[in-house]
Image (cartoon, helix red, strand yellow):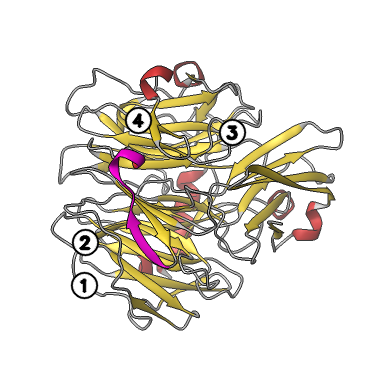
Amino acid sequence: MRDELMRILSWAVLSTGIAGGGTAGTAGPAFTPVQTADFAIPGSLSNSWADFDRDGDLDLAVSIKTGEIRLYRNDRGTLTNIGAAMGLPVSGAEMRGLSWGDYDGDGWFDLYAGATKATEANLLFRNESGRRFVRQDLTPVAPGRSARQSSWVDFDNDGDLDLFASNRSGPNALFRQDAGRFVRVDAEQAGDDARPTVGACWFDYDRDGDLDLFLANQAGATDALWRNDGGRFVDVAPALGMDRPGRLAEDGSVGCAVGDFDNDGELDLFVASYGVNSLYRNKGDGNFENVAPQLGLAEDNHAVGAAWGDFDNDGWLDLFVAAYTGKSGAQQPANRLYRNLGGKGFENILPAGSALDVADHGVQWIDYDRDGALDLSVTRGYTATGGHFLFHNDLDKQTARRSLSVRVLDKAGRFTRLGAEVRLYDAVGKIIATRQVSTGEGYNSQGTQPLHFGLASMTPVTVEVTFMDEAGRKTRRLEHVRPERYAGTELMIRER
């Protein structure tokens, strides 16, 4: 009865579209809260999705301030907490930066959790064929680390997953995996950054065949863009005008999100900040331009995390931003859902009082019920009334099916190509969309969900995947892909 009442109330609120959050007279987005009684757990911090049991749908991991890590098994759209039974902690040190990654290459997603306090140990749990999780002793850890983001990436293109550990209280650390062992990369090579880092986004911004690293830094520090030059990393943010010098001590960047908002084939970068937010448009020549002011995204607020997702399946990436107002202990969410106006600008369509306005930590777009429409997963960790909330996207069935999900696999059929890029082209060869396999976004989390493409029509498309290996960038193309053939499932493309 409680869930049903919440659905009715949320629909009434979401459909008003009154002044204060969206444009007057414009209906708000139609989403329905899911399992509200189960998910209303105060102190919810990180949320990260993966199909840990390989049954074909996405499962949810959530970290709680009590030290519990909840694992919700997804059974045809119903989520059940099985974390304790699977060997995950029910209490202990507070964890953030939950990240799924198949570090041992056995085909099963393992789970890494970074400790919030510098005095606590990070945790790595090995997934034993979906039956249980076993803590490993080889946990990569930087001494004195205060974690917010943890990133599984193959920075050296040798075919296995390495780990980047951002640090809010000291130098970051990059760990190279060597035959199952994690070895910290020398500071001279990795460009260890001692600034207080919160958000980390890896992407090949210069298209030279390896993943570069953007760092969102807090406490008035400048941001960084570490260009991966193979044997070393070089901070090019000052040269590119992306370092944001001169900020007040209470300002700084928090989260970052990679997405091609204007469908030109280049990966752009949104940076959520305490202060004015930025949207760096990738000009395709190794340079960026901050277009947030002219596109309606340069709000001055306490933004925490952000995630790109085409929630209305119109072919353009929209943006959810988690932000808050108020002092410590009394924070109130002040979220935004920016609808993309065809790459020409953004409009916040989240009405005042919306049921969606509850996030102050993790943000993820996922299609948990595989109906073709992106659902929204968020967390609220501040104040005594929090939770890890899930909202079902109520697009009509025809619009929801106007989409395509793509999963990128390595040569062995494993999900290890984080940072790979997928582009769609129409019948005349015009690019219509670009996505990157996530390397972390939304603050505190890194999902392994398939790439979702909303489509303006269901006409056949060409799908091009860009992989990176020791030889650089290489592509694989599938022509005449008919999206309707993959309704309710995924197009899987394997590296050759």
Residue type marked 4: Ala
How far across and how far down the image is residue 436, in percent? 57, 44
Looking at the rendered image, the disc whose residue lies closer to the viewer, 2 or 3, is 3
Q: Which residue is mark 3?
A: 207
How far across and how far down the image is residue 247, in percent? 23, 21
Among the two numbered marks 2 and 4 on one chain, the one whose residue lies closer to the N terminus: 2
Q: Which residue is mark 1?
A: 91
Q: Is residue 192 left or right of residue 53?
A: left
Query: Does 185 appear in magenta?
Result: yes
Q: Nearer the viewer, residue 276 or 80?
A: 276
**Circle 2 Cα neighbour tier, 10 Å, few/some/many (<14 / 14–19 / ≥20):** many
Q: Secondary structure at mark 4?
A: strand
- Residue 13 showing in the rendered view: yes
Give the residue at x 58% y 57%: 367
Label disc, if present, on residue 485 of the rendered structure = none
| Stretch in magenta | 180-189
Residue type marked 3: Arg
